[in-house]
Image (cartoon, helix red, strand yellow):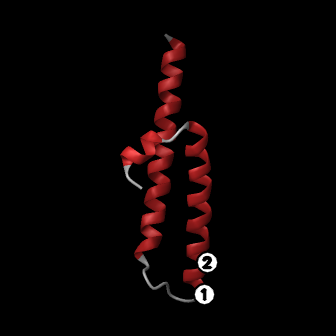
């Protein structure tokens, strides 16, 4: 998921996407522990997607806090 796609999401969609990606990453880790994944780089991609989503969520929260403080 690209940053432009993430910025286009609404706040609720962003939170839902975070939950989905975290669940997906966890299932990938479990599957990899049982038997090696065909593409183990998917673990890194999933982790990075979660980080991107959380960064955007934090940015919006900070932006909202700044706007309400002024």
Between 69 and 42, the one nearer to me in the picture: 42
Which quarter of the figure is the N terminus placed in?
bottom left
**Mark 1 crowd level (few <14, some 14–19, many ≥20, 10 Å Cα):** few
Between 16 and 28, the one nearer to me in the picture: 16
Report the disc number at residue 30: 2
The Cα atoms of the two marked residues, 1 and 2, are separated by 6 Å
Local SS, label 1: helix
The residue shown at (47%, 71%) is: 43
Between 62 and 1, the one nearer to me in the picture: 1
The residue shown at (40%, 74%) is: 41
Q: Quadrant of residue 39?
A: bottom left
- For the residues labelled 1 and 2, say whether their Cβ atoms are less than 8 Å apart: yes
Local SS, label 2: helix
- Residue that badge 1 annotates: 34
| 26 vs 18: above or below | below
**Mark 2 crowd level (few <14, some 14–19, many ≥20, 10 Å Cα):** few
- Whole-percent x, y for residue 27 in the image: 61, 72
- Whole-percent x, y for residue 21 in the image: 56, 59
- Whole-percent x, y for residue 53 in the image: 49, 48
Say whether residue 10 is left or right of residue 38: right
Query: Residue lying farthest bottom?
Result: 35
The residue shown at (55%, 67%) is: 25
Report the disc number at residue 13: none
Query: Residue lying farthest top?
Result: 70
- Whole-percent x, y for residue 57 in the image: 51, 40
Q: Quadrant of residue 26?
A: bottom right
The residue shown at (59%, 81%) is: 31
| 17 vs 63: above or below | below
């Amino acid at each position: 998921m690209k940053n432009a796609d993430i910025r286009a999401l609404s706040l609720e969609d962003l939170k839902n996407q975070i939950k989905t990606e975290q669940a997906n990453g966890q299932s990938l880790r479990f599957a990899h522990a049982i038997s090696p994944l065909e593409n183990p780089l998917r673990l890194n991609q999933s982790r990075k997607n979660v980080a991107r989503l959380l960064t955007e969520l934090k940015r919006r929260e900070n932006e909202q806090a700044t706007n309400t403080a002024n």
